[in-house]
Image (cartoon, grey):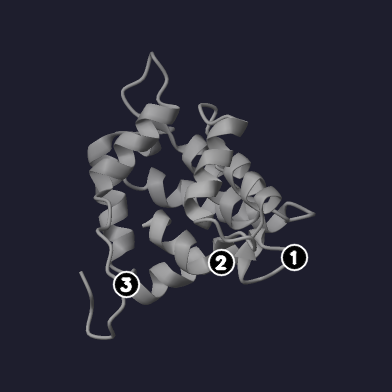
Amino acid sequence: MDNKKGEKQYKKMSNKEIFRILAFEFRQSDSIGIKISLISEMVSNLFYPNDVTGEAKKAFKDLIEKAFKSHTVNNKEEITEQQFCSAMDSIEKYMNEETNDRFLQKIFRRHSKQDKNYLNKEEFRVLMQNYKDENINEKDIQEIYERMSNGDKNGISYENFKKFSI
């Protein structure tokens, strides 16, 4: 689907789909929800991979935890699907295509060291490790990198990163 500028539009995942992906990765066997600390750790690692002092990462992590806990009953340490969707709905009031693009650019730029227009293999590997998915191995990372870089010797362009991230 194209927008009026002729740019490709991509289907956005629903909050339920996002929760279910996170639940697949992070849910504990004795739990009905996802530990908020796991979500905040993953997101803060993506946003602040190179925070030397850890102060910015911790402040951002605390902010995420506070936002999600405010949607749980009695500020629980875990969040259910319904609570997660409610929290995301309240956050999405402030999100639009522009803020979504800034979000992805921030992640891309913070991991892109050598050439700010591309992620090389090592930078992409670090980004994927910051995601903290224990089910993704080096072979998976290599396959994803090859698909996203589309054979470009420079690596993954921001446009391809955005296309595969949405």
Callout 3: helix, strand or loop?
Answer: loop
Q: Which residue is mark 1?
A: 114
Which amino acid does the dot numbered 1 rest on? Gln
Which is nearer the eye, 159 or 77?
A: 159
Which quadrant of the view contains residue 134?
top right
Q: Tell me which label, 1 or 2, sits earlier in the chain.
A: 2
In primary-sequence order, the first of circles 3 and 1 is 3
Tell me the CA gap for discs 3 and 1: 30 Å
Residue at the disc numbered 3: 96
User: What is the residue that sits farthest to the bottom in this orientation?
Assistant: 5
**Residue 106, label in figure:** 2
> What residue is rendered at 79% in x and 54% in y?
53
Looking at the rendered structure, the kind of residue marked 3 is Asn
x and y, in percent, of residue 62 in the image = 55, 50
Q: Residue 80: which quarter of the image? A: top left
| Residue occupying image coordinates x 61% and y 49% | 127
